[in-house]
């Protein structure tokens, strides 16, 4: 039987809270798939990381990444369905990250999602994976034994907005104004290097393995954060943008010494040992996290009526950042929504969650099967300036 054309796909039966969405993510170097019920309850979350493939190059190689995605996408989706205990026939929709990311990697996931949705006659929805990070904190596993869920229902989400959103990862450092999970505006972004990339480069300078973020975080716990006076980037007064290139350079000079000028000046390289590495990690982390807190403080000055702080991205797993964000939220009287550790990295569950909300908002109508992948985000940008951003409160 030939599947029906776009616009006449089978409309999932039942309450929106019962609908099952398969989420597929392949924007960078994680091949991921997840089955999520009602936009919140995660039945499976399969992630195939490529860290071993890229460790030699200390960064993601696009061609290697896309080939690995092509090899792994089918077994990852199959395992997600098996772990969730559902069949393809029970899937009500397919969500996939379509931007931003490595174009070759994205195309693998988009092609797989299109094939599944078309053959199953189910709605297809493409989502922005950075935007999806902002709902990762709303995901939860169903408790063993079917106990009560400690998360608000979809209908109660409106009480959490307006809000600020923070995404910190290997490729992104951005602050957003959120009127809802589907209505977000960029207030500040990365001018040069994202915070996660800075962590990886700092680790490389110190001779630590890739990926560097988790290792720097772990070693920093035994170091003294005031040993090295690393700079905290402020940029222009009131700016909500990030810049971490100067911090990377400061680490390079600290370890290898400042280059001499015409034979004069300069400093000597330090001896790398357990103590000096731990101190450098702690000092670096204090500066990197300090920059994030500084920019969030500025954002809250112009977004006085924000009720919640949503956080997502791989660096949201960082121990110091989580602690500082929780303290900030308490001091400011904000609710904070942090993802559990398994939902910090790129994953299919957050894609399914945002896809569910997108489809529910438009009556579960499918995207056209002509949707394409894009390396760039389509999230609108707004300059905060020095005044108050007027955001209407929800009734």
Image: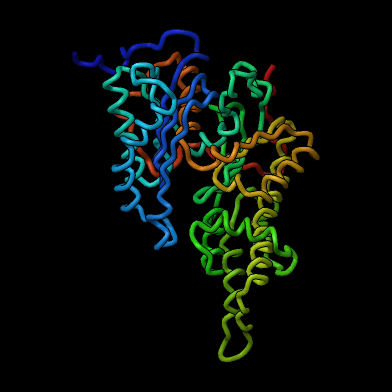
Q: In the displayed structure, does residue 365 sit left or right of residue 260? A: left
Q: In the displayed structure, does residue 287 sit left or right of residue 25? A: right
Q: Is residue 170 above or below residue 384?
A: below
Q: Residue at x 66, y 60 (%)?
A: 220
Quarter containing the C terminus: top right
Q: Residue at x 60, y 69 (%)?
A: 251
Residue situated furthest left in the rendering? 1
Q: Is residue 372 above or below residue 323?
A: above
Q: Residue at x 60, y 33 (%)?
A: 137
197 or 90: nearer the eye? 90
Quarter containing the N terminus: top left
Indicate the quadrant where residue 126 lies: top left
**Residue 26 locus on image (x, y percent):** 39, 40
**Residue 314 locus on image (x, y percent):** 54, 46
**Residue 219 locus on image (x, y percent):** 64, 61
Q: In the displayed structure, does residue 3 sit left or right of residue 376? A: left
- Number of marks: 0
Q: Is residue 22 visible?
A: yes
**Residue 148 locus on image (x, y percent):** 64, 18
Q: Is residue 301 visible?
A: no
């Amino acid at each position: 039987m030939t599947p029906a054309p776009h616009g006449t796909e089978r409309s999932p039966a039942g309450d929106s809270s019962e609908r099952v969405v398969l989420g597929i993510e392949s924007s960078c170097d994680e091949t991921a798939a997840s089955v999520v019920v009602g936009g919140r309850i995660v039945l499976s979350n399969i992630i195939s990381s490529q860290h071993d493939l890229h460790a030699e190059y200390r960064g993601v190689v696009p061609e290697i990444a896309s080939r690995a995605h092509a090899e792994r996408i089918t077994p990852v989706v199959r395992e997600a369905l098996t772990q969730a205990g559902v069949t393809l026939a029970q899937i009500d929709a397919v969500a996939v990250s379509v931007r931003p990311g490595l174009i070759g990697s994205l195309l693998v996931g988009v092609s797989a999602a299109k094939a599944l949705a078309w053959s199953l006659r189910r709605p297809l929805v493409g989502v922005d994976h950075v935007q999806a990070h902002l709902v990762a904190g709303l995901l939860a596993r169903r408790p063993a034994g079917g106990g009560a869920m400690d998360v608000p229902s979809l209908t109660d989400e409106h009480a959490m907005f307006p809000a600020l959103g923070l995404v910190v990862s290997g490729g992104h450092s951005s602050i957003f104004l959120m009127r809802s999970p589907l209505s977000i505006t960029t207030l500040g972004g990365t001018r040069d290097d994202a915070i996660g990339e800075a962590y990886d480069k700092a680790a490389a300078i110190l001779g630590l393995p890739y990926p560097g973020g988790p290792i720097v975080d772990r070693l920093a716990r035994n170091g003294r954060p005031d040993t090295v006076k690393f700079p905290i980037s402020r940029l222009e007064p009131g700016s909500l943008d990030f810049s971490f290139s100067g911090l990377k350079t400061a680490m390079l000079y600290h370890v290898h010494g400042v280059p001499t000028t015409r034979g004069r000046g300069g400093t000597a390289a330090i001896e790398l040992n357990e103590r000096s590495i731990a101190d450098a990690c702690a000092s670096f982390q204090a500066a990197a996290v300090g920059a994030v807190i500084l920019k969030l403080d500025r954002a809250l000055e112009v977004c006085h009526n924000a009720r919640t702080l949503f956080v997502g991205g791989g660096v949201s797993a960082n121990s110091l950042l989580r602690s500082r964000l929780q303290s900030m939220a308490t001091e400011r009287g904000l609710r904070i929504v942090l993802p559990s550790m398994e939902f910090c990295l790129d994953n299919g569950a957050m894609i399914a969650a945002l896809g569910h909300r997108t489809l529910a908002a438009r009556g579960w109508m499918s995207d056209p099967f002509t949707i394409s992948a894009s390396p760039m985000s389509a999230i609108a940008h707004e300059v905060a300036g020095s005044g108050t951003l007027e955001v209407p409160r929800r009734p």
